[in-house]
Image (cartoon, rainbow, N blue to C red):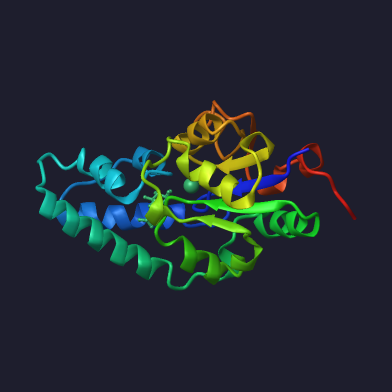
């Protein structure tokens, strides 16, 4: 059995991946180019600047560092507006029940999100108190697919990586979990998340008893 669960946020617990994509689309619109749907998957788990670089591959011109800083800031302003109305209804299916069960069973719960907006999102969703540790994206020097953020969360929980189960909707995230020496549950498309040890379409399909010991 596993001793801890470490979660990505956007697209695993929170229905916010679509807001990241919408915000990027509105930036592309303003800049006069359009984004193909694949960008939605390409920016999952990828930090803000690296996501912008992916977006700008479709722009047809190069941007200076100052322009990039400005666009990244604009994207964030729009994203922050989009998430301003988040409520517990924006939790993805199965998330609340899973977090509740883990807490009751005394399993460590960690967050490994690349988002600098993770704290307000957790608070708006009403699940901030469920987390025993949050690996702060602001202090992570190597973004996913590097394992640093998952290892930091395991460290915060005082659990060895081999005893941690990681949950991710992004390819880069699954790679990070595996590189950390953890077991990976992919949430979403089996095609995209091939490296995962187990795949569920959403958290309602997660087989809790296979991974965690139920105490009551
Ligand atoms: C998550 C999302 C990415 C996003 C990143 C940074 O990993 O999946 O799409 O780019 O967080 O988010 P931030 O809120 O810091 O811009
Ligand atoms: Mg994600």
**Can you say whether 161 is above or below 93 in the image?**
above
What is the quadrant of the C terminus in the image?
Answer: bottom right
**Could you tell whether 148 is left or right of 70 in the image?**
right
How many marks are shown on the rendered structure?
0
Residue 134, x across and y down, in percent: 54, 57
**Can you say whether 162 is above or below 31 in the image?**
above
Residue 169, x across and y down, in percent: 52, 42
Q: Tell me which residue sits at (80%, 54%) in the image.
A: 105
**Can you say whether 63 is above or below 20 in the image?**
above
**Can you say whether 147 is above or below 24 in the image?**
above
Residue 106, x across and y down, in percent: 77, 55
**Could you tell whether 56 is left or right of 128 in the image?**
left
Front-lying residue, 117 or 58: 117
**Could you tell whether 189 is left or right of 1 in the image?**
left
What is the quadrant of the N terminus in the image?
Answer: top right
Q: Tell me which residue sits at (79%, 59%) in the image.
A: 104
Residue 93, x across and y down, in percent: 65, 54
Q: Tell me which residue sits at (60%, 70%) in the image.
A: 126
**Could you tell whether 61 is left or right of 214 in the image?**
left
Furthest residue toward right: 216
């Amino acid at each position: 059995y596993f001793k801890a669960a470490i979660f990505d946020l956007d697209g695993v617990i929170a229905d916010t991946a679509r807001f990241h994509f919408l915000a990027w689309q509105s930036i592309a619109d303003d800049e006069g180019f359009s984004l193909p749907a694949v960008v939605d998957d390409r920016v999952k788990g990828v930090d803000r600047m690296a996501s912008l670089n992916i977006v700008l591959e479709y722009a047809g011109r190069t941007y200076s560092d100052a322009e990039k800083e400005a666009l990244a800031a604009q994207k964030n302003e729009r994203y922050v507006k989009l998430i301003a109305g988040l409520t517990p209804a924006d939790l993805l299916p199965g998330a609340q029940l899973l977090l509740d069960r883990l807490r009751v069973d005394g399993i460590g719960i960690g967050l490994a999100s690349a988002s600098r907006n993770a704290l307000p999102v957790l608070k708006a969703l009403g699940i901030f108190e469920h987390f025993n540790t949050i690996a702060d994206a602001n202090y992570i020097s190597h973004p996913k697919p590097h394992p640093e953020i998952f290892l930091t969360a395991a460290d915060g929980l005082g659990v060895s990586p081999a005893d941690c189960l990681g949950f991710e909707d992004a390819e880069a995230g699954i790679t990070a979990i595996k590189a950390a020496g953890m077991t990976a549950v992919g949430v979403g498309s089996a095609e995209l998340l091939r490296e995962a040890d187990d795949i569920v379409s959403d958290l309602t399909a997660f087989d809790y008893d296979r991974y965690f010991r139920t105490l009551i």
